[in-house]
Image (cartoon, rainbow, N blue to C red):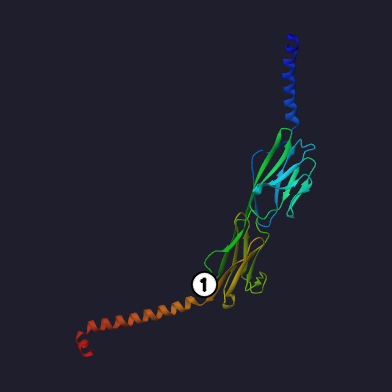
Amino acid sequence: MPQTQQFGGPWRQLWYSDFEEFQRLTEPSFDNNTMSNITVQLGGTAFLHCRVRNLGERTISGVRKKRWHILTSGMFTYTNDERFRKIFFITTTTTRVKIMSQTVGRLKVSTGSGIMSHFVNLHIVVPEAFILGSGEHHVDTGSAISLICMIEKSPVPPQYVFWFHNDRMINYDTARGGITVETNPGPKTQSHLTIRDAVDTDSGNYTCSASNTEPASIFVFVSEGDKMAAIQRRKTSSGTSMILDVILWLNIFPGLSLIIR
């Protein structure tokens, strides 16, 4: 009996040690155990990457935290929403999900000791476009029209930014000349429209239209504002000089002031 106990003790410890090591090496595990944060714009495609080691015959399930709804499991999809799909690779399991609302997803794998999960926090953003300034822009004839369109909250820069004048796309190669557009893509894409030597026909509605946002518009008025202001200034200064002349004349000839009264 003492020999059996002595043999059984070390053997049991050795066996459990090997089993735990074997279990550690063969149990599935996620490459990344922390929560992943993914940002995608509205209407885009979100890729929820789930890389699992030692998957074996086990299956991966995609669960939406809202109501804990199982979306996919193995090769099967358990939702009528066609935006959810799964793509499998030999060494990497990748879940491709296209979602139109903000959510928290959970990718889980069943193991011999329970269920292991990897959480993915999906943020949906809506890009916005706006033209700097108020809803109206006033310029003088002969000066330059300068409009700046900003596209914000866009994880990916827009594929294009077009400018329209009264619903007609602006042609930069027109014989008129003097029209340039400079677009700088980035987290805050900026498109700068410049029209030199503005004339009356340049008045109207200007629209900035990007590939991933609703269009933004502004109304431009081209007028001879400086000329009218100059005329008014000349009239005002002329009237002031006449008043000064009368006052000075009356002060020089005070006796005549009695006759005028």
Q: Mark 1 points at which residue?
A: 138
Q: Where is residue 170 in the image (x, y as percent from the top left)?
A: 65, 70
How crowded pointer 1 is (Cα within 10 Å; few <14, some 14-19, many 20+) is rated as few
Q: Quick check: 127 above or below 250?
A: above
Question: Residue at (23%, 82%) from the top-left corner?
Answer: 252
Question: Would residue 182 be found to the left or right of residue 228 on screen?
Answer: right
129 lies left or right of 256? right
Quadrant of the drawing holding the N terminus: top right
* Residue 203 in the image, given as x and y percentages of width and height: 57, 75
Which residue of the protein is positioned furthest toward the front in this rendering?
1
Residue at 51 percent of width and 77 percent of height? 224
Secondary structure beneath label 1: strand
**Image spot of residue 8 (x, y percent):** 74, 15
In this view, the residue farthest toward the bottom is: 259
Q: How many marks?
A: 1
Q: Relative to residue 42, is residue 143 drawn left or right?
A: left
239 w.r.t. 73: above or below:
below
Residue 115 visible, this angle: yes
For residue 249, which quarter of the picture?
bottom left
Q: Is residue 155 above or below residue 199?
A: above
Q: Quadrant of residue 109?
A: top right
Amino acid of disc 1: His
Instruction: Give the quadrant of the C terminus.
Output: bottom left
Q: Can residue 141 be seen in this view?
A: no
Between residue 120 and residue 247, name the one nearer to us: 120
Residue occupying the point 44% across, 77% down: 230
Q: Where is residue 16 in the image (x, y as percent from the top left)?
A: 73, 22
